[in-house]
């Protein structure tokens, strides 16, 4: 059976051009970038070029980009790195209830280490309130970490406004932009962020590579020590080929990003309209006007996640309930719980559909028809 | 091109590239996704882990995939230290460990840990008696490398493991990054609790490593997130990198069985040829790993020699790539008690299963020629 992949927010297939860019590097430029001979210097050159392009894509400088093994490590490096470096200044951190687990679990770890963490609520539209943030800021707040785009709902947080609020405050501002990078234009200065996480496998790049942007002069305590790679902020032999693959993926966003967004938005619209035509009872979670083009999270009253996903899967539809990263378990979504409340039905009957390169009008329409049939069957 | 810097990094096997290519194309889904496509990838991961376990003669659940040797070392050392600090805060290691071990230990000193850095003899060896004598009531971890990356010294790991085994509170970690596939190690030895490995040193890809954690050994994670890999190492798995590593492991073990004598033979040729020249001192012990030959040529600037060799398409290194940037002195040679005329003028020649007798002959000839040319320039 051929599957229709509607789970691009979990991960994306590598773009053929990305694979094509990586193979010659693995074959021919395999030197260790730290080696001083020709082979090493060649590899170093590729790293430098990639760093240049990637930095440019968010209006940053090369030296502000630290490559990591992915989004999870980047989030950890930001939170732990800032917290440990600034413990003498203060121990208060602000984040939100709707973050990815890479941030939430790290914040919980820091609580155990004696930090005080405020988890801002989000409203029904999925956004935080600026007033809440202002009221939570304290003299000992050292870090505010708020994701740019939520991975379950696609809801965009008012990052620029938050950046403006924090301009007058000592606290560093980190944003988890794993779902935003490639989907929204990013200018770190305009946003006023000090740290920003991204991951390649969400934008048709390889798994196992990401970056953390760290504004010039912002110091972090590294979580991984060893050689002097990445200006001592992230030790370990650089993954040259993956970095080049990431570069290609970013390059493709530069070229195709706008077209992609238009396409994905249209596919999402088509999906929703098809459900509407079939008279299915459903409700979109999160304020749609604040969502990225590729993600929609839909609640189907009278159903539950388990039976929805099982039936979708049997029909060859690959979607998910929020974050793939909750590794196998289908607990009620913590994001939707934050938006509504823990008892709300929507936390247990919602599915995330995310569109991308594997989709076209035909398979999106087909999948919506299938979804409609299944939901009808389950609710009749 | 004659590449003799295989301890810095190796060129990937063709079969490794094939695996990478196949998995990247055909198995792109997120292994945590609970749909069919995710399930397929999860199975692939499980299979890869089982294969690695069977090759290493350990249990699948005793293996964690990481982003490389540096992360494995950091995770092992900090993970044990943080998890078991209530039992004691003393760590034993040696002065000639890789920076990823030394710097991980140093970072712990900041948090109140006391680290003993054992000295080594002129061949770079620690003795089991030294280790035993350093053990205190509050010692929780011994971290000692199997094969040294600069001079190839093999440490008496099994004897140290036998000692460690007598202290139930004590964990023993082995950095096996350079030994893997070259010098056998009985990983399942009851006294070995943790062991680090890296893919790019065995003709795999950069960005993937392994950490063996003996069943029943608990350690604190370095990063926190979506629960992958028993929460010890969360983050979306680098599936193609992992499958490629297991492929590299299998091929390397085949090579170790069939071709290790060839490396030993090449190693002997190099020694014989270079030892005959009065300008050259051989630093690597005869009992060391066959693939690493460290020499000193007092009076010759390593970078200049490396550069001259590079022009003739021959690639060797000074010391370990990771620490090549700073002062010219090799900390490893210094720890062996050698004088500055040798520690400042060290070279490392490191072999793979693919180097040939002709390459070695040509290298030896060219190396001596380069020394002659340079001494003319220097007016000796
Ligand atoms: C918002 C967000 N942050 C962090 C991550 C973690 O990134 P990675 O999978 O590269 O570790 C993800 C994806 O899983 C994500 O969606
Ligand atoms: C002995 C030893 N340990 C650890 C490492 C680090 O491994 P990686 O380069 O995969 O981070 C290296 C190589 O750089 C090494 O030679």
Image (spheres, rainbow, N blue to C red):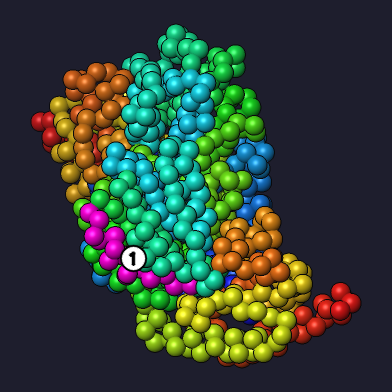
Looking at the image, residue B264 lies above or below residue B293: below
Residue appearing at x 73%, y 81% in the figure = B279
**Could one spot residue A222 in this view of the protein?**
yes
Which of the 4 image quadrants contains residue B322? bottom right
Q: Secondary structure at mark 1?
A: helix
Q: Is residue A134 left or right of residue B28?
A: right
Residue appearing at x 30%, y 54% in the figure = B171
The residue wearing badge 1 is B160
Looking at the image, residue B229 lies above or below residue B226: below
Image quarter of the C terminus of chain B: bottom right
**Could one spot residue A358 in this view of the protein?**
no
- What's the magenta region? B153-168
Asked whether mark 1 lies closer than 8 Å to ligand 2, one says no
Q: Is residue B303 magenta?
A: no
Residue appearing at x 52%, y 73% in the figure = B123
Looking at the image, residue B349 lies above or below residue B257: above
């Amino acid at each position: 059976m051929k599957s229709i992949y509607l789970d691009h927010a979990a991960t994306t297939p590598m773009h053929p051009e990305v694979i094509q860019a990586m193979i010659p590097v693995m074959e021919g430029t395999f030197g260790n970038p730290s080696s001083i001979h020709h082979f090493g210097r060649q590899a170093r050159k590729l790293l430098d070029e990639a760093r240049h392009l990637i930095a440019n894509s968010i209006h940053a400088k090369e030296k502000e980009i630290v490559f990591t093994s992915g989004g999870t490590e980047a989030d950890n490096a930001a939170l732990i790195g800032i917290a440990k470096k600034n413990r003498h200044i203060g121990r208060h951190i602000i984040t939100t209830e709707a973050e990815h687990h890479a941030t939430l679990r790290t914040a919980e770890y820091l609580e155990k280490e004696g930090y005080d963490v405020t988890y801002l609520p989000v409203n029904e539209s999925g956004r935080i309130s600026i007033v809440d943030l202002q009221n939570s800021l304290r003299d000992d707040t050292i870090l505010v970490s708020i994701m740019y785009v939520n991975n379950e709902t696609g809801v965009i947080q008012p990052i620029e406004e938050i950046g403006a609020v924090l301009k007058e405050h000592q606290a560093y501002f980190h944003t988890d932009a794993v779902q935003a990078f490639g989907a929204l234009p990013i200018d770190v200065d305009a946003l006023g962020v000090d740290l920003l996480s991204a991951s390649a496998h969400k934008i048709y790049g390889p798994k196992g590579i990401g970056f953390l942007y760290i504004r010039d002069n912002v110091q972090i305590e590294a979580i991984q020590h060893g050689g002097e790679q990445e200006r001592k902020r992230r030790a370990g032999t650089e993954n040259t080929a993956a970095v080049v693959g990431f570069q290609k993926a970013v390059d493709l966003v530069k070229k195709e990003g706008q077209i992609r967004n238009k396409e994905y938005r249209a596919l999402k619209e088509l999906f929703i309209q098809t459900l509407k035509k079939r008279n299915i009872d459903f409700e979109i979670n999160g304020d749609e006007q604040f969502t990225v083009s590729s993600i929609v999270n839909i609640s189907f009253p009278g159903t539950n996640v388990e039976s929805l996903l099982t039936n979708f899967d049997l029909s060859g539809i690959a979607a998910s309930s929020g974050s793939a990263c909750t590794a196998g378990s289908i607990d009620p979504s913590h994001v939707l719980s934050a938006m509504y409340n823990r008892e709300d039905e929507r936390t247990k009957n919602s599915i995330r559909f995310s569109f991308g390169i594997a989709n076209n009008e035909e398979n999106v329409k087909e999948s919506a028809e299938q979804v409609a049939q299944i939901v009808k069957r389950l609710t009749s | 091109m004659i590449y003799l810097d295989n301890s810095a990094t190796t060129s990937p096997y063709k079969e490794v590239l094939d695996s990478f290519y196949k998995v990247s194309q055909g198995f792109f889904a997120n292994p945590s996704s609970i749909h069919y496509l995710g399930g397929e990838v999860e199975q692939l991961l499980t299979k890869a882990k089982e294969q690695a376990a069977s090759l290493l003669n350990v249990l699948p659940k005793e293996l964690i995939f990481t982003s490389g040797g540096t992360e494995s070392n950091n995770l092992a050392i900090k993970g044990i230290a943080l998890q078991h600090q209530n039992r004691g805060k003393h760590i034993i290691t040696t002065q000639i460990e890789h920076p990823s071990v030394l710097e991980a230990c140093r970072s712990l000193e900041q948090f109140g840990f006391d680290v003993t850095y054992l000295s080594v003899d002129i061949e770079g060896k620690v003795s089991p008696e030294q280790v035993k004598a350093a053990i205190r009531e509050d010692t929780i971890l011994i971290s000692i490398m199997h094969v040294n990356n600069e001079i190839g010294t093999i440490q008496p790991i099994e004897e140290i493991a036998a000692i460690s085994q007598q202290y139930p509170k004590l964990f023993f970690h082995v950095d096996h990054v350079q030994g893997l596939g070259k010098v056998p190690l009985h990983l399942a030895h009851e006294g070995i609790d943790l062991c680090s490995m890296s893919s790019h040193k065995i003709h795999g890809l950069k960005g993937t490593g392994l950490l063996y954690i003996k069943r029943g050994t608990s350690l604190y994670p370095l990063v926190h997130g979506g629960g992958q890999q028993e929460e010890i190492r969360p983050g979306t798995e680098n599936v193609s990198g992992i499958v490629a590593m297991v492929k590299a492991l299998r091929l390397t073990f085949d090579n170790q069985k069939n071709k290790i004598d060839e490396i030993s033979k090449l190693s002997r040729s190099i020694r014989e040829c270079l030892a005959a020249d009065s300008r050259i001192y051989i630093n690597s012990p005869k009992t060391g790993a066959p693939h690493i030959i460290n020499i000193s040529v007092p009076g010759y600037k390593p970078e200049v020699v490396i550069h001259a060799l590079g022009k003739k398409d021959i690639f060797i290194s000074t010391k370990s790539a990771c620490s090549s940037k700073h002062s010219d002195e090799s900390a490893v040679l210094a720890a062996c008690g050698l004088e500055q005329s040798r520690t400042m003028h060290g070279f490392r020649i490191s072999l793979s299963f693919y180097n040939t007798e002709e390459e070695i002959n040509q290298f030896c000839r060219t190396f001596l020629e380069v020394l002659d040319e340079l001494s003319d320039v220097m007016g000796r």
